[in-house]
Image: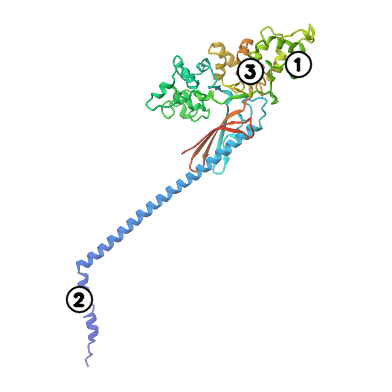
Amino acid sequence: METPWDNSLLDATGPAGAVPSRDIASSCNPREAGRKGLVLIAVLWIVAVMTAIVAVVGQTSRLNMKMAIAATDEVRCKWACRAGVENAIGVLNEDTKDSDCLSDLWSDNDEDFNDVVMERCQYSVRVTDEAGKLNINVATKDQLMALPYMEETIADAIVDWRDGDDDIQAEGAEVGYYENLPIPYTIRNGPLRTVRELLCVKGVTEENLYGEDTNLNGLLDSNERDGDLSPPSDNGDEYLDEGWIAYLTCCSYEKNVDADGDNRVNINQADQQQLQDQLELKASQAKWIVDNRGGGFRSIGDLINDNSPKTSSSESSGGENQAEPLDTQTFSQIADRITISGEQKLPGRININTASREVLVTLFGRDEQAEQVARAILTERATMLYGFTSIADLLNVQSMTTERFKAVAELITVRSDVFTIRCLATANVSGATFRTECIVDRSVSPGTILYWYQGANY
């Protein structure tokens, strides 16, 4: 018996293992194969584009993250600098004000000022005494000429810049010079407000002002002794040329009070009884002051001379009506308590405890003897724990004559109120740095800010 064929199966598959004719046709169709190839290429392109997008997005994200970290670190360092400044002001306010020297905590304080660690950053502080510098607003031309690398043309131009007239110094410059520059500007014709204003004065360059110490840290860094290999340009030696900014100021002064904060006695105005009572002088000594002041002493140093006795006699030979010159011992005891000025603030007084050799030389002239006196002062004060406590202590310094002392007595002091605070903060992660510089007057608690500058570096 024959088995009937399943026509439906045959129609579907044909003979055993045979491929349907339409599948064979489609598999051999070049258009269909082309479409599949295009799809594959499109997929590969999409993958490539998505990979590029992911890479760009990742790079952008990393860049944004670094920028966010840098911005955060900048803010962190900014407030770290503020903390450093406030720390320094606190130290200055706690410091005793009877005298100021380089051994005080505001000057010598590694623990509180160097590499102070905060959250993800650290700061360092440097405090300098403005009274240890030459005040450019009251300095004479001879004093300016005693500064390192000073030229007469620049000294004359500085005098012209600060004076109130249009009279030109021998080699100076007045309004006509500055108004005819390619980019003209107005001459000050008044006191300089900041030391950096010197850069506006004819002939003054950044090299003059900053020297090799462009970061103003007072240290000879590696880039400041490598010649022209890296900024700043330097001479490659082992000595730091600090520039005039280390020797000049425009905001130093001394309050006209003694170590206890009491007003000084004006020896040109006080009568004999006041001199006796307030200075605890003998009647004969007070009488000598009144009899010899004439039109007024020009310096408290005029109370003594080379012939002054070392110590006072126990009794006055002629009684109260006999004038007796002051001895050097008595003068030393009252030197900080007397004055010839009625002003409350005495501008430009130089602190002999903090002034550098270069600044001390400007007090005594430009000769070899001036250099010897300056070095003798540095040597003498190095042996003192608290420095000179009175300007009269200079009389004990080798090479110091009475005449030299009298010439500088109205130019010097042993205490200070105005200080520059420089703070540098560095971030631990990004390496961002932030600098703050301010000048503070501590005579008014908690301190008056006279100048403020801040900025970030990366």
Secondary structure beneath dot 3 equals helix
Give x and y (percent) for residue 441: 60, 30
Q: Give how far apart the Cα atoms at labels 2 and 1 are.
A: 140 Å
| Residue 324 at least partly seen | yes
The label on residue 273 is 1
Residue 285 against residue 420 in the figure, above or below: above
Amino acid under disc 3: Glu
Q: Nearer the viewer, mark 3 or mark 2?
A: 3
Q: Nearer the viewer, mark 1 or mark 3?
A: 1
The label on residue 88 is none
Q: Give how far apart the Cα atoms at labels 3 and 2 are.
A: 118 Å
Q: Which residue is mark 3?
A: 380
Residue 126 against residue 352 in the figure, above or below: below
Residue at image x 44%, y 48%? 64
Answer whether labels 3 and 2 touch (C-beta < 8 Å). no
| Residue 111 at least partly seen | no
Image position of 446 (left or right of 321):
left
The label on residue 21 is 2
Answer whether labels 2 and 1 touch (C-beta < 8 Å). no
CA neighbours of label 2 inside 10 A, class few (<14), some (14 to 19), many (20+)? few
CA neighbours of label 1 inside 10 A, class few (<14), some (14 to 19), many (20+)? some
Image position of 40 (left or right of 104):
left
How many numbered marks, from 0 up? Answer: 3
Give x and y (percent) for residue 346: 61, 22
Q: Give how far apart the Cα atoms at labels 1 and 3 are.
A: 37 Å
Give x and y (percent) for residue 352: 61, 20
